[in-house]
Image: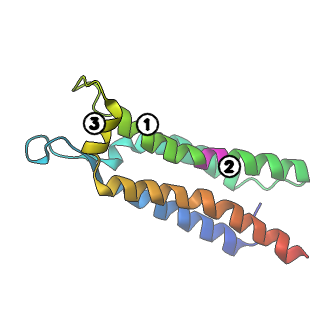
Amino acid sequence: MFASKWEKKTFARIVLLSWAGLFLPWFSFEPSMEGYVWGFLFFPYFMMQMAVLVVFYNNEPKDELGVFIVSIITELCLVTFPIIYIWQMFTWYTPFVSVDNIFETSLEITYPSFWISLVLAIIPILAFPVLRRWKKDEAK
């Protein structure tokens, strides 16, 4: 999938950097009374995805079809990270409160650190095709 070890290491560093958002506070209704909901509480979801990602990251298919399939599956795994972030934003407080407008309430209780975490989760999605593209450019 990657042309060199440098691209492989760079992608691994980018994915690890995207995990930095897990150590930031994401949500809270009233921090002085209830505390914060931190990103690392959702770590088991990310561990399952990273296990799948590591399998495809270390897989080196020999034919064009194998490279295409592994690339698509890896990209799909990367896309699930922001989806889980957004899903958590809309559902973490539902056992505590019943509200009519979930979207508005979610936006009110979300901290800027959640949005930073979401942007960090999107970076590997954009970096993966770029790092793969360098392989094709070097081959010409």
Indicate the position of residue 88 as horizontal and vertical percent values. Answer: 39, 38
Indicate the position of residue 102 as horizontal and vertical percent values. Answer: 33, 31
State the image quarter where residue 49 is shown: top right
Q: Mark 1 points at which residue?
A: 87
Q: SS class of the residue under badge 1? A: helix
Q: Horizontal placement of 26 versus 32: left or right?
A: right
| Magenta-colored span | 74-78
Disc number for residue 105: 3
Image quarter of the N terminus: bottom right
Q: SS class of the residue under badge 2? A: helix
Say whether disc 3 or disc 2 marks the residue closer to the N-terminus: 2
The way the protein has been coloured in the rendering is: rainbow
The residue shown at (13%, 40%) is: 34
Q: Mark 2 points at which residue?
A: 74
Q: Which amino acid does label 2 sit on?
A: Thr
The residue shown at (68%, 55%) is: 57
Indicate the position of residue 27 as horizontal and vertical percent values. Answer: 26, 45
Q: Which amino acid does label 3 sit on?
A: Thr
Disc number for residue 11: none
Q: Horizontal placement of 7 versus 46: left or right?
A: right
Secondary structure character of the magenta stretch overall:
helix
- Determine the CA span between mark 3 and mark 2: 33 Å
The residue shown at (31%, 29%) is: 101
- Decide if residue 3 is in sight here: no
Q: What residue type is labelled 1?
A: Trp
- Determine the CA span between mark 1 and mark 2: 20 Å
